[in-house]
Amino acid sequence: MRVLMLSWEYPPHVVGGLGKHVAELAPALADLGIELYLLTPMRRGGAERETIAGIRVYRIPSPANVYPNFYEEVVHTNETLERACEELLATEGPFELIHNHDWLTSFVARRLKHAHKLPLLATIHATERGRGRGQLLGEQAQRVNDAEWRLTYEAWRVICCTRFMADEIHRYFQVPLDKVDVIPNGVDPTPFQKLEGQDLSAFRARWAQPEEKIVLYVGRVVQEKGAEILVRSAPFVLARVPEAKFIIAGTGPELERLRDLVQELGLSTKVLLPGFIDDKDRDRLYKVADCAVFPSLYEPFGIVALEAMAAKTPVVVSEVGGLAEVVRHAETGITIYPGDVQSCAWGILHTLEHPEWTRQRVQNAYEEVLRVYNWHTIAEQTAKVYRRIVEERARVYW
């Protein structure tokens, strides 16, 4: 089967969960014999054309113009992508379907669908209305929402990662639930398994004293991820566990405001905000952390929680969105009320003060990661959707 995949993110350009998902799913699909051609804008370097783990990757350079907003940049980048796709179809076609990830490349995906009578599969990773917690804040948000609606309307089928997301796109875009396949995100435990048995004490010493307990957050520093809730919970945790040390790793528009808040609360020796960290340091931080906290206000899935579980790090997460499906309270982690500082502090304290219960949750979580959230299983589920679409397409006149 020959599939044309479109994604705004692909390494080395990875911003969030979308890029990680595509980077891990694509090689797993190739391992199943799917002939995959992946087109993506060239945003952060990489070769224009290369084969990686059996995937033919095409990074398309875009004109370095200044646009009035991000939406306009996306639209014009899609025009460049479309020209590249047409060239690819002429030289490497035909393809049996298009698999498009999120609204960012949906403009070219929809045009190719109609021009070449190709069925379109859409994976929706998040929605603009969801990020606004039910609201569309401004004209650009409305235009993104419209693009998301068009994509789900035009798609033959829609994949989303949780039942929460399935319900969200059903409510927001009136997508029939029998058109939606729920296939979770996954995680590769190999980088963490390679760290087992290694002496990480020197690395840990860069971040905390030997007696300190590391409370870790990894992710984008944006309002919906709830990092402010974690900072505000720190004084309540420190009142009972003064040896706690908080590390909030990541970048985003809220970072400077968080730094100001840390200074305002007098926490500069107890809360570190290092900004960007590379993947190797991220993985090592998971391994040396005593607790990983993800206090999101909106979360379609939460790959960071899976990463922590794969690293055998105890997790505390908001009982919201996809996180509530990935983490089961008192079985694979601790869930807390979203937006609640006291609840966040309680979850951290429960994890740090009850190590025997915490160890059992960690083991349960790790076993579930290996059984449910492995990329081979997820690729098989995705390939099954591919086959269904191709078989249905063969039975209809277009």
Image (cartoon, grey):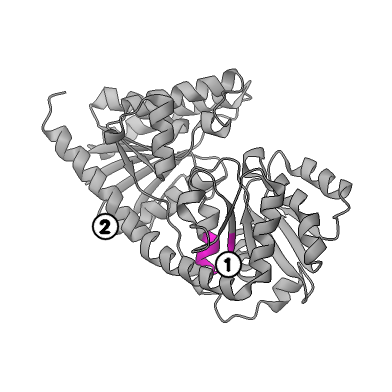
Secondary structure beneath label 2 = loop
**Is 373 positioned to the left or the right of 299 in the image?**
left
- Mark 1 crowd level (few <14, some 14–19, many ≥20, 10 Å Cα): many
Identity of the residue drawn at 60% across and 41% down:
297
Q: Of residues 183 and 394, which is closer to you in this image?
A: 183
* 269 drawn magenta: no
Q: Quadrant of residue 173?
A: top left
User: 141 or 115: which is nearer to us?
Assistant: 141
Q: CA distance from mark 1 to mark 2?
A: 31 Å
Residue 275 in the image: x percent, y percent? 72, 51
135 to 214, vertically: above or below: above
Q: Which region is colored magenta?
A: 307-315
Residue at image point 39% right, 50% down: 184
**Vertical comparison of 361 with 179: above or below:** below
The tag on residue 38 is none
- Mark 1 highlights which residue? 313
Question: Farthest top residue?
Answer: 139
Decide if residue 349 is on the left or right side of residue 193: right
The amino acid type, in three-letter code, at marker 1 is: Thr
Sequence-first tag of 1 and 2: 2
Up/down of 60 relative to 325, above or below: above
Residue at the image position 77 percent from the left and 49 percent from the top: 232
Q: Residue at image x 71%, y 51%?
A: 342
Location of residue 109 by image quarter:
top left
User: Which is closer to the viewer, label 1 or label 2?
Assistant: 1
Q: Picture coordinates of residue 75 (x, y %)?
A: 49, 24
Residue holding disc 2: 32
**Residue 252 in the image, given as x and y percentages of width and height:** 68, 42
Q: Nearer the viewer, residue 38 or 184?
A: 184
Please tell me whether residue 236 is drawn above or below residue 314 in the rendered image: above
